[in-house]
Image (cartoon, rainbow, N blue to C red):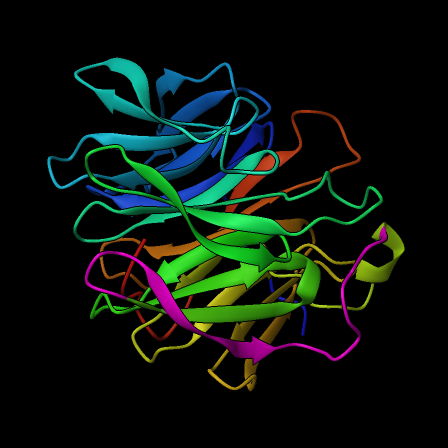
Amino acid sequence: MTVKTTLLIDGLGFPEGPRWHDGKLWFSDFVMKKIMTVDLEGTVKVIAEVPGQPSGLGWLPDQSLLVVSMADRRLLRFHNGTLSEFADLSGLASSYCNDMVVDYDGRAYIGNFGSPLFEQPYQPAEIVLVTPTGEARVAARDMAFPNGSVITPDGKTLIVGETLAARLTAFDIESDGSLSHRRVWAQFDDLGLLTRRAEIINRVTPDGICLDAEGAIWVASPNARSELVRVREGGEITHRFELEHTPFACMLGGTDCLTLFVLTSSLYESDRAGRIETIQVDIPGAGLP
């Protein structure tokens, strides 16, 4: 079904990595190379500029902000108004770094492209784990473009969208942050890897994701139908919304955590086609981010 959204702000470049934190929506704009916040009245504030293109966001226990810098494959820390390198990922991540989730202990799980999107030959990617002290190691390999990620409220399960495999994949989080018991959480089809742009037309291609209190996941799918879907473990789709603009990320937040923020844009329009839109839902957000 087609759903009417409410526009919060427009005129952005390419908004990504939404996080509800401290009464505001935090997000990256990797075209404008800025980290920004917006409140429920639409007031925007620039937090920092990131020349290497910002993506995933998260917070350490001391409330300093971690920021994925895509092009130079670094994890940055923003503290007391200053950006500094927290971890160099260039020797661990195969390509541009992307989304990230940070757990309650401050451990960051970061995906990357693997190979440039839809370029041949296809190469799988890694999930890199960065500890709260800045030590980095590979936590999982052979991922098909690991993208949006969530951690369950008990802190024990990481779920990652594999964009090019049309699936969500889960891992157990061990006491040292290592990932184990890899399994398919939800498979959207059985058509194999997406290796060409034309193949995304009628497939769910999970980009940004968020978790709700019933354990279901909202998935932004930038396919030809510009879909936003809500899926349960095992693959049951409970909601399937078609939007006017293409969604690349989503986040539950607001005063009651019942506002679904949807970050939309276009890969083909001008660099100011980005928007943040909202939908009111019935089940509040849960877990991380």
- Residue sitting at the far left: 62
Residue 132: image location, x then y, percent = 20, 39
For residue 26, which quarter of the picture?
A: top left
Residue 136 vs residue 71: left or right? left
Residue 231: image location, x then y, percent = 52, 77
The residue closer to the viewer here, 126 or 207, is 126
Q: Which part of the image, by quadrant, shows the N terminus?
A: bottom right
Residue 238: image location, x then y, percent = 53, 83
Image: magenta residue range: 174-196
- Residue sitting at the far right: 198
The residue depicted at 19 percent of the width and 30 percent of the height is 64
Q: Is residue 6 visible?
A: no
Is 104 inside the magenta-drawn segment? no
The residue depicted at 41 percent of the width and 36 percent of the height is 27
| Secondary structure character of the magenta stretch overall | loop
The residue closer to the viewer here, 131 or 222, is 131
Is 176 inside the magenta-drawn segment? yes
Q: Is residue 244 visible?
A: yes
Callout count:
0
The residue closer to the viewer here, 175 or 261, is 175
Residue 263: image location, x then y, percent = 53, 46
The residue depicted at 60 percent of the width and 45 percent of the height is 264
The residue closer to the viewer here, 107 or 81, is 107
Residue 74 vs residue 271: left or right? left
